[in-house]
Image: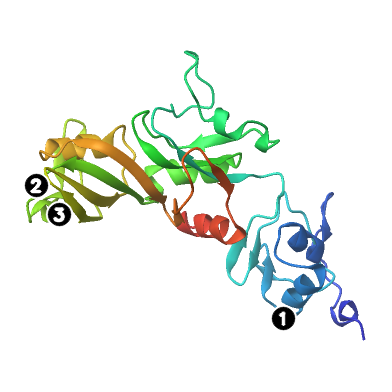
Amino acid sequence: MRRDDRAPKTDAPVFEGAERLQKVLAAAGVGSRRACEDLIFRRRVTVNGKVAQLGDRADPTRDVIFVDGERLQADTRLVYLALNKPRGVVSTMADEKGRTALSDFVGHRVEQRVYHVGRLDADSEGLLLLTNDGNLAHRLTHPSYGVPKTYLCEVAGPIPRNLGKRLAAGVELEDGPVTVDSFKVVDTLGKTAQVELTLHEGRKHIVRRLLAEVGHPVSRLVRTSIGPIRLGDLRAGRTRRLTNAEVAALFKAVGD
């Protein structure tokens, strides 16, 4: 008996553009069509909250698909990139003053027009996300979703022992208080030190203003992670596409 014969007929609505579910999964990079059929048969796939069956169809542009409990972005028109922004580059896709901008590092590498998620000032470097998924971008930047970001900073030392507690307790800035989720000293280099801190804040220059307020101005700042996405060993000026697992982790981070 063929596997398709085991599946009962379903009365789920079929939209224009819907395709066999195993084809949608395979196109999204889950695996071969045969492997995707096996996932469906083993009840490891849901579509719009319902356990999928062999023979089901789905529209990747509108249906919500989960595989093993993780959200799958099946719409192949959507692009998700990580960029290691170099120092001196402005966080805009194009700059009126002719300065080096983010599009200079994407250019012809992707056909779709993408936008940056959040910002890093020109003197800062590190991880930026680029996407044409406006809904996810909004959630990643909106303060109500509280997506954490981690930074590695070179600051003036020495660092007092109680600085972590002080930052966790909250520091008052001109536009309101700010607290950090975690803080640690990574290394000390004579009169300077490397510190790592994680916070949910997205206000302009928040890390630089925070550390300057407590007496440790920043000489270098690198963002090393946004939620579950890490900069890793991505070289400055290079981009890479996020994996299916990373995109799923981003959706999970914003509660989707």
The disc, 1 or 3, on the residue closer to the chain's N-terminal end is 1
Which residue in the protein does label 1 denote? 42
Label 2 environment density (alpha carbons within 10 Å; few <14, some 14–19, many ≥20): few
Please tell me which of labels 2 and 1 falls first in the chain.
1
Q: Secondary structure at mark 3?
A: helix
Give SS at disc 1.
Answer: loop
In the image, which is nearer the foreground, mark 2 or mark 1? 2
Q: Which residue is mark 3?
A: 164
How far apart are the two marked residues, 2 and 1, measured between alpha carbons? 58 Å
Dot 3 amino acid type: Gly
Residue at left offset 71%, top offset 44%? 77
Judged from this view, the residue extending furthest toward the bottom is 1
Foreground residue among 124 and 15 = 124
Position of 111 with respect to 95 (left or right) is: right
Q: Secondary structure at mark 2?
A: loop
**Nearer the camera: disc 2 or disc 3:** 2
Question: What is the distance, in whole Å, between disc 2 and disc 3 at their CAs?
Answer: 13 Å
Relative vertical location of residue 99 with respect to residue 78 in this rendering, above or below: above
**Residue shown at 11% from the left, 40% from the top:** 214
Residue 175 image point, x, y percent:
21, 32
- Mark nearest the camera among 1 and 3 is 3
Q: Position of residue 24 (x, y in %)?
A: 77, 59
Name the residue at the front extreme: 190
Res 53 seen here: no
To which residue does mark 2 refer?
158
Q: Position of residue 5 (x, y in %)?
A: 90, 80
